[in-house]
Image (cartoon, grey):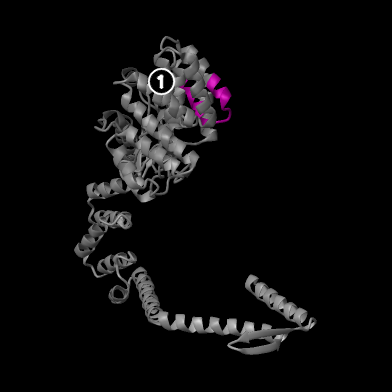
């Protein structure tokens, strides 16, 4: 557009100039070689313009003829390059579509038309074609040659990393990822793999530096970086609790500042503060975390903050914790546990029943069974509560990739992913579970009285005679006991399941010591 305006302006100026000369007549006399030439001023101006135009045209023709070899060669070179890029584009599309034959054909065509040192993508297409053909050894050699080119180094490392992952060689994969992360920490695949390696071997300081590099390169958001730092600092604090309590306390407090709602960070930070007899500061840390999300570990540490407290003092601290988060099952459970320890059975029963109404789960039924046994010793009601606990949803636990753990861990034991454990209820038990006792079938009792007494003895004494498993899973014992009772029902009249259990004899009850029931 600007060129058109300039051209029109020049034409307009020339027109004005010729019009100005036409309005002012005059003659121009030229004497050359004894001859005198006289023409009008207008004719002289036209002649001068014509001569200038002729000179320009002649110069353009001479210049064009002089540069014609270069122009012709450049034309063919551009045409050849365009064909090469077209072949390269078609080959990349074929490689992405999985057409190995077409990818190899276009690789050779592009290599003939474009030099690989001018276009590095030819090397990538060549390696991809080898992968599609199943020649992984050749592909690895081509990726290794890319390491010598600074422009292709990261691409070569990426290819070698994927090949190592395909072969299942995690050490080699992490080696290539570490080299890539050292050069370009903004690469997500390299940074994540290196982070998994650092956390697996417990190099928490190295992992913190890598997360800081990710944050500086804008690879992850600020909130995500703070969360990762909190997890890593918590893991570092756990590792240094015994060897370096001062460093552990500093790491735990920093983690708690980054994520005040993160329960593991709050628990270890408060625990380290309690060890220095600063109960007030540790209590504030736990109270802040409890307001965000109640957790049984927080309640346990909060109620036992002072080792010299009496059971009533711990009950009062549990009630204070309940005030911070009312109408929550964990609050009621915390008060119920403290009340049971203080032998305030009325409060313990009330709070346990309130927890069941808010969140019907096995832990609440087990706690209510503890209260029932401690207060009345009615084994019939205790077994009734245990059967409800078996059918109730499971208590929340730390779950990651199908692994259920009572303790939090910074990484998943299956995938090695950082911050994989979440506090939630594990997968429900398989099969249909009957929710109410009214739906239970009541068998017809047709056996002899001696057989009935024998059946009652077997059902009552069965859980006490079973040995505890080696892994400490008391929950599996209770589940197996309940399964044994169900099997006894299915055996017919020989081992009937009584709808109204009369309990045990007083002399048997005196022999049994009080115990707590736990399924997990």
Depth check: 481 or 86 in front?
86
Which residue is pictured at 45% across the width and 30% down the height? 263
Quadrant location of the C terminus in the rendered image? top left
**Above-or-below relation of 466 to 127:** above
Res 457 → quadrant: top left
Check disc 1 and report its element: helix, strand or loop. helix
> Quick one: which residue is furthest to the right in this view?
23
Res. 5 visible in picture:
yes
Rendered location of residue 440, percent (x, y): 44, 43
Res 207 → quadrant: top left
In the image, the segment drawn in magenta is 320-339
Quadrant location of the N terminus in the rendered image? bottom right
Which residue is pictured at 37% across the width and 36% down the height? 209
CA neighbours of label 1 inside 10 A, class few (<14), some (14 to 19), many (20+): many
Rendered location of residue 174, percent (x, y): 27, 47
Q: Answer with left or right where residue 224 lies relative to residue 116.
A: right
Rendered location of residue 484, percent (x, y): 31, 39
The chief SS type of the magenta part is helix
Depth check: 319 or 263 in front?
263
Residue designated by label 1? 271
């Amino acid at each position: 557009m600007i060129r058109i305006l300039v051209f029109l302006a020049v034409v307009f100026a020339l027109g004005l100039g010729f019009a100005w000369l036409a309005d002012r007549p005059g003659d121009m006399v030229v004497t050359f070689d004894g001859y005198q030439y006289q023409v009008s001023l207008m004719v002289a101006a036209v002649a001068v313009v014509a001569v200038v135009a002729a000179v320009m045209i002649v110069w353009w023709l001479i210049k064009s003829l002089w540069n014609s070899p270069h122009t012709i060669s450049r034309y063919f070179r551009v045409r050849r390059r365009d064909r090469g890029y077209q072949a390269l584009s078609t080959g990349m599309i074929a490689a992405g579509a999985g057409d190995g034959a077409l990818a190899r054909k276009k690789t050779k065509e592009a290599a003939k038309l474009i030099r690989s040192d001018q276009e590095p993508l030819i090397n990538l297409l060549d390696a991809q074609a080898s992968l599609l053909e199943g020649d992984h050894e050749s592909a690895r050699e081509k990726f290794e040659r890319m390491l010598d080119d600074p422009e292709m180094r990261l691409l070569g490392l990426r290819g070698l990393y994927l090949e190592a992952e395909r072969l299942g060689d995690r050490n080699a994969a992490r080696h290539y990822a570490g080299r890539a992360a050292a050069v370009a920490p903004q690469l997500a695949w390299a940074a994540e793999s290196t982070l998994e390696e650092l956390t697996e071997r417990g190099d928490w300081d190295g992992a913190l530096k890598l997360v800081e590099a990710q944050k500086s390169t804008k690879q992850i958001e600020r909130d995500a970086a703070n969360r990762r730092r909190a997890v890593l600092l918590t893991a570092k604090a756990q590792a240094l609790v015994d060897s370096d309590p001062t460093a552990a306390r500093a790491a735990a407090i920093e983690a708690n500042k980054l994520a005040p709602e993160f329960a593991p960070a709050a628990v270890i930070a408060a625990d380290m503060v309690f060890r220095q007899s600063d109960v007030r500061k540790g209590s504030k840390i736990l109270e802040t975390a409890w307001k965000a999300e109640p957790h049984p570990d927080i309640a346990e540490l909060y109620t036992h903050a002072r080792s010299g407290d009496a059971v009533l003092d711990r009950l009062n601290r549990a009630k204070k914790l309940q005030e911070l988060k009312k109408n929550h099952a964990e609050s009621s459970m915390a008060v119920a546990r403290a009340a049971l320890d203080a032998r305030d059975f009325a409060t313990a029963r009330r709070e346990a029943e309130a927890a069941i109404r808010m969140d019907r789960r096995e832990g609440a039924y087990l706690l209510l069974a503890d209260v029932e046994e401690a207060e009345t010793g009615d084994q019939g009601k205790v077994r009734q509560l245990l059967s409800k606990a078996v059918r109730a949803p499971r208590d929340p636990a730390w779950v990651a990739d199908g692994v259920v753990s009572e303790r939090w861990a910074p990484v998943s034991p299956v995938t090695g992913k950082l911050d994989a454990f979440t506090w939630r209820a594990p997968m429900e038990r398989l099969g249909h579970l009957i929710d109410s006792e009214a739906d239970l079938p009541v068998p017809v009792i047709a056996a002899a009285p001696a057989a009935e007494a024998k059946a009652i003895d077997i059902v009552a004494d069965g859980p006490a005679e079973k040995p505890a498993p080696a892994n400490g899973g008391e929950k599996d014992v209770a589940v197996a006991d309940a399964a044994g009772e169900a099997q006894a029902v299915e055996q017919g009249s020989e081992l009937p399941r009584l709808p109204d259990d009369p309990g045990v004899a007083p002399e048997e009850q005196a022999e049994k010591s009080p115990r707590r029931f736990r399924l997990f």
